[in-house]
Image (cartoon, rainbow, N blue to C red):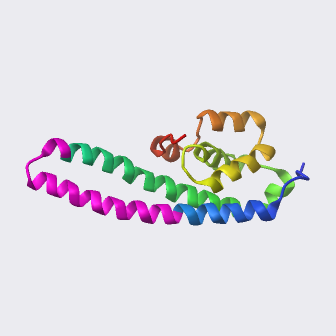
Amino acid sequence: MGNKNFDKVRYKTLLGEASSRMTIRRGKKVNELYRVRDKIIDFVKNGDMNSALIYIDNYINEENKLKVYDVLCTMCDQMKGRVAEVENYGITDDMATNANAIVYSSHRLDIKELEKLADILKEIMPKVEFKDAINGTCKNEIVRDNVSYRK
């Protein structure tokens, strides 16, 4: 059942690069949230509760994206550990949720490695599952509920 056009080296490399890129983005997001927290404190001290509430809402949304990066990094690491299985059998049922989340987030996060992974997964995933993931059916609720549409 294996895919003869499957480039396992490129696939494994992209999984590692995607995980690294998300770790970097996560660190930047954490630093940004520290700055926003200071702004919220200043607004509250000055009695500008309307501005504080706007920043708090944005803060919560951005903080939830940290969960997305954590989950996707874990999924990429799991997929990376099973490259030989993907090469021989394609995406099996126990890896379908991970593949689905990677494809779902590939066009919703600005991470080029995820987009390239989605292109590879398009060739080895069942067509219906790929189409569902690209069109917005994500099986992982953490990713589905906390990722925002970028493109």
Residue 113 percent location from the top left of the image? 65, 56
Q: Residue at x 61, y 47 (%)?
A: 106
Q: Is residue 56 visible?
A: yes
- Residue drawn at x 80%, y 58% is 85
Question: Residue at image x 46%, y 54%?
Answer: 67
Q: Is residue 5 left or right of residue 33?
A: right
Tell me: residue 110, above or below residue 74. above
Quadrant assignment, res 57:
top left
Name the spot of residue 53 as percent of width and height, x first.
21, 44
Was residue 25 drawn as part of the magenta stretch in this picture?
yes
Instruction: Identify the main secondary structure in magenta.
Output: helix
Count of marks overlaid on the render: 0
Compared to residue 23, the image places residue 103 above or below, namely above
User: Which sits in the foreground, 146 or 150?
Assistant: 150
Percent of width and height locating residue 109: 54, 48
Q: Which sits in the foreground, 92 or 73?
A: 73
> Who's the residue at 38% across and 63% down the image?
30
Query: Could you tell whether 115 is left or right of 151 in the image?
Result: right
Please give left or right for residue 147 compared with residue 7 in the image. left
Percent across and percent down for residue 49 are 14, 44
Quarter of the figure that contains the C terminus: top right
Residue 150 within the magenta-colored segment of the rendering: no
Residue 84: tell me if it is visible: no
- Along the viewing direction, whichever of 113 and 144 lies nearer the viewer: 113
134 in relation to 87, above or below: above
Report the span colored magenta. 23-51
